[in-house]
Amino acid sequence: MTSVLGTAGTAIVARDLRRSFGSTQALRGVSLAVPAGTVLGVLGPNGAGKTTLIRILATLLAPDGGQALVAGHDVVRESFAVRSRIGLTGQYAALDEQLSGRENLRLIGRLYHLGERRARARADELLALVDLEEAAGRSVGTYSGGMRRRVDIAAGLVAAPAVLFLDEPTTGLDPRSRIDVWNVIEGLVRDGTTLLLTTQHLEEADRLADSIAVMDSGRIIAEGTPEALKRQVGGDVLELRLRDRSSAAAAAAALQPLAAGPPREEDGILAVPLHGAEGAVVEAVRRLDAAGVGVIDLGVRRPTLDDVFLTLTGQPAEAEEYVA
Amino acid sequence: MTAAPAPAPAVRPPGGLARMAWGLYDAGALTWRNLLRILRNPAYLLTEVVVQPILFTVLFAYVFGGAIHIPGASYIDFLMPGIFVQTITFGSMNTAVALAEDLQKGLMDRFRSLPIAFWSVPVARVLADVLIDVVGLVLMVAVAYLIGFRFHGGAAAAVTVALLLLLYGLAMACLGTLIGMALRTVTVVQVAGFLAIFPITFASSTFVPVSTMPWWLRAVAGHTPVTAVVDVMRHLTLGAAATGADLAAALAWMLGILVVTIPAATYFFRTGR
């Protein structure tokens, strides 16, 4: 290996990756390192550059500048070696709808040159893994969104890749299908697959990733374990709907000892970042009652991508123009 | 549940014939997929592969046949080389649409993320579509024969016609591949195809002699690949000796199309633009 980036035990290393489309700078210098056997969640809104990053790391797109090694090989100069060591599952289920789930997976197996017998055996193994044995013979066109996504993830696993890329694996899925997909991904994580997944949901990154990189406008603006990130964001948020909106200041004052940061009000709902969720609701109710503040409704919710962005950039996550 | 450790992919040979064989295996697997996809789609199979060639043959033979008199030949004998070429030319749009579909559905990204020979995807597209052309041509010849078409050349002329049709099918499939890779979306491909393929097919010697057209149209229609290929095949099927110049013009068009489209389509595929 000729690169200065190469580090034993690191599955993905990127340094200062840049890429523009016309006048749009999709990546403005992204650097990251993913240790082998760990999961990096890349969190960001539409247009942050997540898909561009994955496409460069998966050798589909050449960077304008910077360098990246995946599974020990340079994504530009040794793209073929990279391709035989990765699996990619893009944002849209990349399957042939006229073919059955089994036929799709066998085709991928053949294209990895597993040999006919092993391609067939591997397809059946993976269909069992993603719990699709019953639908295996039906054409993918008849599958639900969640089923497609599971076959699509299986297609990324055919050659037991050293590194797996999942681009927004649960976007567009209903809550039940999302949990099915999470279960599949958690199984992979237990088996030690190195995974880079992108998501727009903090909850998803929190559940699946060992470490999270927050992307905004082509840059990584924060990086760390989910715990560290949530600590930075302020953890859980107490939301209350006040009987009288003019009592917001009184409520904020009453809740001051519980608050990890300044409260904000939107559409008559007061949101207070909490130090910790334990006992917070009871304590809040007691304090509000003592202060004589009337509350219609109150609850604790997990921080969202919006909270992360508000904390990190002072602005809500903005859905920018989508960049492929 | 945990899957058994999967087999690692085979290691690609460093070069030479073994490496070529690796790519041909990829192309074979993908061609199989392309054909299976067509076989699974009865509507497409019926309209594009079976009904359309037969419909055009019968329709044009009987609708125009009574009105158009070709000196020294029956209209069906005059028409059939034109219908062969028209069917293949229209087929190039099916090639382009199929590729645009793969691009839009993300399948192209998946293929490009695999350790396959980068040329195997376009080659598989072309192979499958030329095979479909052959099926359509065999059907057309059979139907045309039933309604009076006869081949007036010798065996050598027949073989030449078959080879010319194959070469034209190859050129049109490569053109379709380039159009699909360049335009990338199904609707754009369809509009562009309609605007380009329709005029070039009809403003030609496909259905009527170019000499019957007004001078300005003749100036264009007399110099298209469609006219060049139709003319040389018409000479051969009518039993007239094809001139070397006619054959050279047809071959030049087809080889020219191949020389331009293959590198361009390969470029689009390799760079993922």
Image (spheres, rainbow, N blue to C red):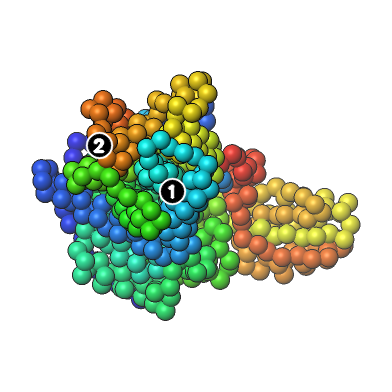
Examine the rendered structure and indicate whether residue A150 appears above or below residue B73: below
The residue that mark 1 highlights is B94
Q: Quadrant of residue B248?
A: top left
- Label 1 neighbour load within 10 Å: few <14, some 14-19, many 20+: many
Marks 1 and 2, how far apart at CA = 35 Å
- Quadrant where the N terminus of chain B lies? bottom left
Circle nearer the viewer, 1 or 2: 1
The residue that mark 2 highlights is A77
Examine the rendered structure and indicate whether residue A138 appears above or below residue B132: below
**Is B74 positioned to the left or the right of B185 in the image?**
left
- Label 2 neighbour load within 10 Å: few <14, some 14-19, many 20+: few
Total residue callouts? 2
What residue is rendered at 46% in x and 58% in y?
Answer: B51
Q: Nearer the viewer, residue B251 or B55?
A: B55
Residue B155 visible, this angle: yes
Residue B85 visible, this angle: no
Residue B187 position in % (x across, y down): 54, 44
Residue A9 position in % (x across, y down): 25, 51
Q: Nearer the viewer, residue B139 or A239?
A: B139
User: Looking at this rendering, what residue extends furthest in the front direction?
Assistant: B72
Q: Secondary structure at mark 1?
A: helix
Residue B151 position in % (x across, y down): 29, 48
